[in-house]
Image: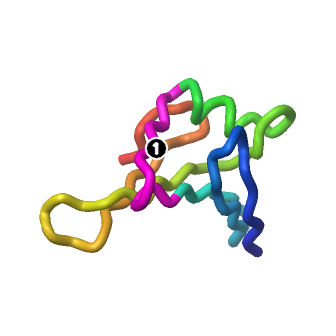
């Protein structure tokens, strides 16, 4: 299931699968800085969107089409 949405002007897609939910932000056309505090607020299931992991698609500067970064609900980078 995919649901588009906006939070404070930040477009995102929320996706569900196999018991997990993800928020995906496409930052290829507009730079988006997702600080740990913003990730934690977005992950809050009572006041934010709620997610297990946040994926941020960014332009790649080494010739690839894009690079993908993941953040956990606590704002830490996912390895």
Q: Residue furthest right?
A: 46
Magenta extent: 26-36
Q: Up-down: is 48 above or below 3? A: above
Q: Which residue is rendered at x = 58% and y = 35% of the image?
A: 39
The residue that label 1 is drawn on is: 32
Left or right of 9: which side holds 79? left
| 31 inside magenta stretch | yes
Q: Is residue 14 left or right of residue 70?
A: right
Out of 8 and 14, give the one closest to the viewer.
8
Q: Quadrant of residue 67?
A: bottom left
* Residue under the image location 53 percent in, 41 percent down: 72
Q: Is residue 18 left or right of residue 45?
A: left
Position of residue 32 measured from the top left corner of the image (x, y, whole percent): 46, 43
SS at circle 1: loop
Check if residue 55 falls in the magenta segment. no
**At 75% across and 57% down in the image, what residue appears?**
5
Choose top left, top right, bottom left or bottom right for residue 21.
Answer: bottom right
73 horizontally vs 61: left or right: right
The quarter holding residue 1 reads bottom right
Whole-percent x, y for residue 49 in the image = 76, 45
Main SS of residues in magenta: loop
């Amino acid at each position: 299931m995919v649901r588009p949405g906006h939070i404070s002007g930040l477009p995102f897609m929320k996706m569900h699968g196999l018991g997990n939910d993800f928020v995906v932000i496409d930052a290829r056309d507009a730079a988006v800085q997702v600080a740990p505090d913003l990730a934690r607020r977005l992950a809050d299931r009572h006041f934010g969107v709620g997610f297990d992991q946040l994926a941020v698609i960014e332009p790649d500067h080494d010739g690839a089409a894009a690079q993908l970064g993941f953040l956990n609900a606590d704002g830490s980078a996912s390895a």
